[in-house]
Image (tube, coloured by chain):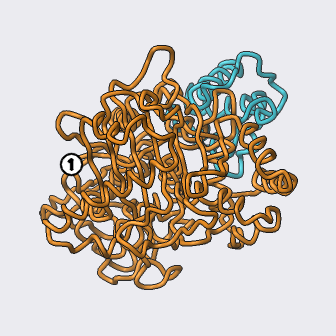
Amino acid sequence: MNTTTHYDVAIIGAGMAGLAAGIRLAHFGKKVCIFERHNAVGGLNSFYSIGGRKYDVGLHAMTNFVRPGVKGTPLGKLLRQLRIEREEFALCEQKRSRVAFGPRGETSLTFTNDFAVFESEVAQKFPAQIDGFRRLVALVKTYDDVSLGAQPESARAVVRRHVTDPLLEDMLFCPVMYYGSATERDMEFGQFVIMFKALFLEGFARPFDGVRVILRVLLEKYREAGGERRMKCGVKQIVSRDGRASALLLDDGTEVTATHVISTIGAPETERLLPSGHLSPAVSNPAPSGALSYCETITVLDRQPAALGWGDDTIVFFNDSDKFTYAASEQQVDVRSGVICMPNNFDFGPGRELPEGLFRCTCLASYPQWAHLPEDVYRADKARWYAEIQRSAQRFLPPLPSPDALAAATLATDMFTPRTITKFTGHAGGAIYGSPVKLRDGRTSLANLYLAGTDQGFLGIVGAMLSGISMANFHILQARV
Amino acid sequence: MTKDETKKVVLEIIADIAPDEDISNLKGDVRLRDQMQLDSMDFLDIVMELRKRHNIEVPEADYIHLATLDSCADYLTPKFAALGK
């Protein structure tokens, strides 16, 4: 008797990549099921509730925003491929953001969704560099960043050919690295191009209600297309036979079979499910975990941040000296640099504002120094670093009217650490951007198992969705029968 | 199905794939690619929607016949006829 359920495609992980792949496959008639260990969808871009408030997990802003009518960009491709109308995401644009360097952010470059603003800031603050900067931008615009065969090249080396002032170089790398780099100190130039376009040439936006609007749209499309999902039911093991994934052993002890398997949970995380313990001949064994993790503090305010005198910056990338170091934190948290996000400062339309103020700060943090602390020490360290991170970030904002103004306006706080990331998303080492090694074609050592999502190498939430789409297209829908 | 009806079928698919394009004044003899922003992902979707909605298979070697609305009509109309449509 054979009672095993069979799917055309089994997808591991209900994050952005898994949902997007699922929509494509179900739309074109495949019998698909998504297996998710957590009780919520979204993966690294989910949301949660505490004390009656909903918080976004990681999303500061959706990158890659372009206005209606701008075509041929990742956002447009994504909407078409998933048959989503632009209005469904109801994206609201950022007001303006900054890169601020120096002990109090003395050197600052403002940017908006209009690239001319950034260009004129560079021209004004770095007049000797503007010609080189324009050459770099021209190169970025023409670079073929989706080519799978491009020779890897150091982004630092390429940028230095055009930008010779180390301060400007670091000010360009800081946002690009913070919003997507899984490698320390330098990155691959193709990845730099993807991020530079996503942040500066395209831009930031968010739905009024945050990431859950995007997730709701994805879930609805998936359901309409006939896709199935199993929540609180992860995959414990990928059973292989004759070089193929022959079955999936689930957390509840049952087994399912599938013609194709797409894993979106990351390279080292997928490798752990394989009896052979080796994901792909293209990566070392074991597949390396990322060394870059983060802490984030979230402060809920009884007023808009602007009412504290903080202006209307949407995102501030800060670094307290001329030299920016993007590397695994040596201390529990590295507060020298970070990212401030004030979600209130998107343009939600006349008279429309978030009901409460939000002040979020992200800094690099060390997974090993958070992972194994006893509970009481962990709590005490969280409280201590919460204060440190806030103090550091405030150096880059206008001074408050009184020293206790922030505490007086605070309604609630929350904080995540590298340990939180691993606990809820299963990502090894608390690495939000995954492994430093990416498998661009998604192929693994098993013929019918493909990788999509973060470790396939597209970045950001738009990148994650496009990754799911392209892997579904390339390996399953486009494949000749 | 007449050639004009075939064109309508193709236009319906394009309208669903690329709702941000204006398809009201497309010329029949000019490449679709030159009149709209359609990339290879979009062409693949036209092929897959033809299969899904109308059971019509377009082998990769024949993609070239989908270049213009007129060539779509010439190529697809006999295929619809073969299915009794």
Percent coordinates x, y for residue A444 in the rendering? 46, 73
Name the residue located 82 percent from the left edge and 67 percent from the top edge.
Answer: A161
Residue reaching furthest to the front? A402
B59 sits left or right of A331 in the view: right
> Quadrant location of residue A278?
bottom left
Query: Which amino acid, mark 1?
Result: Asn
Q: Name the residue nearer the viewer: A198 or A101.
A: A101
Residue A10 in view of the camera: no
Percent coordinates x, y for residue A305 in the rendering? 42, 32
Q: Colour of chain A?
A: orange
Give above or below for B11 relative to B63: above
Q: Colour of chain B?
A: cyan
Image quarter in which the N terminus of chain A is found: bottom left
Percent coordinates x, y for residue A106 in the rendering? 63, 51
A420 sits left or right of A203 in the view: left
The residue beneath circle 1 is A39
> Quadrant location of residue A273?
bottom left
